[in-house]
Amino acid sequence: GGRAVTGRGGGRTYVLGVVPFFLATPFFARATFRTEIIKGRVWGFEQKQGIGLGLNTSVNTRMTILRLRCGGLLVYNPIAPTKECRNLVRELEEELGELVQLIVLPTTLYEHKQFLKPFSKAFPQARVLVSPGQYTWPINLGSRNAGCAKAELLSDQLQLPDEIECAVLDLPPIGLSQIVRFSEAALFHPELKVLMVCDAVISVGKKPVVPISRRDLEEWADDRNTAITGLRLLGLFGVRERWNDLRAARSLKQQDPAERGAEKCAMSLGWQRMAMTSLYFGQADVLRPSKSFEQLSSRLVVPPVLGTLVYGPGKTDEVAAVVEKWSGKVAEWKFSTVIPSHFDVVSATSRDWKSAFEVWTQESPSWTYPKDDIKCLLQVRDFLLRIGVIFDKTTRPNRSTTL
């Protein structure tokens, strides 16, 4: 990709209308960065997105805009339409002489669909397509269109331009309620060999994603930040013991990367800690996550939270069968670039895709993630299964009874 471009005149204010249960961040303002992914055809627009509560655990969320041969621009996964974001899109429209003609919401997840209605209002000429299974919870308001009155349900190929192919993952009810659904629409452009996905896969790069600031990384490189201090005081994930060992070792060597100005080292440590915590919640070594980072980074993988809490353990459940069928359809496409909505754009092929989804196609599956890193998420999964928050094959409502 090319150099990241951001707005010159501010306009980053955007207040989230509804506070999610985990206090999303940034809550009041967010910068937008535009990058050209494929010259003259595909652009990424990135903003910061994460969890608040003083944890400062954030990644990027990416909107992709593709210039169609048939005319117009396709928007995949709309982000917060700040003034800066709108201006960056309109600069592109003016430069190309093309307007936004189609907006696709590829998922049912709240952190993505919350921006659909305001974004579509900013570009009223565009058609809007949404993935199936949209819902509101805990109160069911019967919203099949993700709050956007003109939205159409993305259900077949005929709704998309001929140059775009689509595969929709529509899972059975996964938990909380029979109305809570998970879906994802993957789009493929054969001419450009580009695959666009939302949360299905990620590729964690060695360098921090653009929206994450130096200040964020410095905070995570500091052993005394809020998250690490909280884990140390609570005695979780062995942070207390490792913190004491680490401080003692650094005292002997009289060096602390964050304190003695080794900026490159501190930035790398901060990024590794932030990225791994956002993916595992409690990896094997929170303080020194380099091993965990090396095992997960620079390859196509299913995000651990999605893999453990949504897709489940493999062929033992009907969810895995739906995942296998969908991932198999995507694997038939001849792509060379994968553009996820989080972390890096990556050069990858169907072979890489098949490798990422291997656990959900095996007769005797085993988790693809390192067992010490995934331990926390598996404990969370077991707990949620016991109290009925996540469904299994014995408790899952029949799909025909869902809305």
Image (spheres, grey):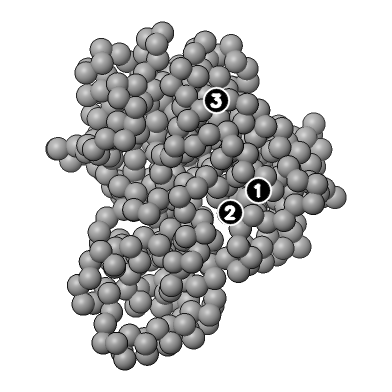
Badge 3 vs badge 1, beta-carbon distance below 8 Å? no
Front residue of 220 and 391: 220
Which x, y percent locates residue 138?
Answer: 62, 46
Q: Amino acid at mark 1?
A: Val
**x 69%, y 48%: residue:** 359
**x 60%, y 69%: residue:** 372
Question: Which element type, helix, strand or loop, lies under badge 2?
Answer: helix
Which x, y percent locates residue 227?
Answer: 42, 71
The N terminus lies in quadrant: top left
Image disc number at residue 334: 3
The C terminus lies in quadrant: top right
Q: Is residue 15 visible?
A: no
Image disc number at residue 305: 2
Question: Which element type, helix, strand or loop, lies under badge 3?
Answer: loop
Number of residues whose C-alpha sits closer than 10 Å to that of mark 2, classed few (under 14), some (14–19) or many (20 or more): some
Number of residues whose C-alpha sits closer than 10 Å to that of mark 3, classed few (under 14), some (14–19) or many (20 or more): some
Question: Vertically, is 387 above or below 351?
Answer: below
